[in-house]
């Protein structure tokens, strides 16, 4: 399993867990909860963008070196 996939999965699960905790127990005020969710969403976006960039770079390198024939 790639580190990006693992990190993305952890962030999604953390976001869902935070939402369920807020739904059932409301430990944070609304603005704090929104900040938590926005931070998790921002981190997830960074992970996804980096994952695509690294994947594209690896595919380009494989294509240029002749290791991959289409």
Image (tube, grey):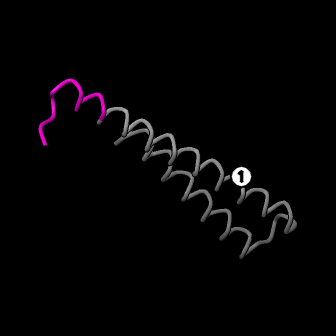
Give left or right: position of 67 versus 39.
left
**On the image, numbered disc 1 is attached to which residue?**
39
Residue 61 within the segment the image draws in magenta: yes
Residue 51 picture location, percent across and down: 45, 42
Residue 53 within the segment the image draws in magenta: no
Residue 35 picture location, percent across and down: 79, 57
Is 35 above or below relative to 53? Answer: below
The residue depicted at 58 percent of the width and 51 percent of the height is 45
Towards the viewer: 43 or 28: 43
Q: Quadrant of the C terminus?
A: top left
Residue 28 picture location, percent across and down: 83, 64
Give left or right: position of 62 versus 43.
left
The residue depicted at 72 percent of the width and 76 percent of the height is 24
Q: Secondary structure at mark 1?
A: helix
Q: Residues within 10 Å of mark 1 (few under 14, many from 20)?
A: some
The residue depicted at 45 percent of the width and 39 percent of the height is 53
Q: Which residues make up the magenta segment?
A: 60-70
Q: Quadrant of the N terminus?
A: top left
Towards the viewer: 44 or 60: 60
Answer with the quarter of the image where residue 15 lies.
bottom right
The residue depicted at 50 percent of the width and 40 percent of the height is 50
Residue 55 picture location, percent across and down: 37, 39
Is 16 above or below relative to 2? Answer: below
Answer with the quarter of the image where residue 37 lies.
bottom right
Looking at this view, name the residue that lies furthest to the top: 65
Is 38 above or below relative to 61? Answer: below
Give left or right: position of 63 versus 37.
left
């Amino acid at each position: 399993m790639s580190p990006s996939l693992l990190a993305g999965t952890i962030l999604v699960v953390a976001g869902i867990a935070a939402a369920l905790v807020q739904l059932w127990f409301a430990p944070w005020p609304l603005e704090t909860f929104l900040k938590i969710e926005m931070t998790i969403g921002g981190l997830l976006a960074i992970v996804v963008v980096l994952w695509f960039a690294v994947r594209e770079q690896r595919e380009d390198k494989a294509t240029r070196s002749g290791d991959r024939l289409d």
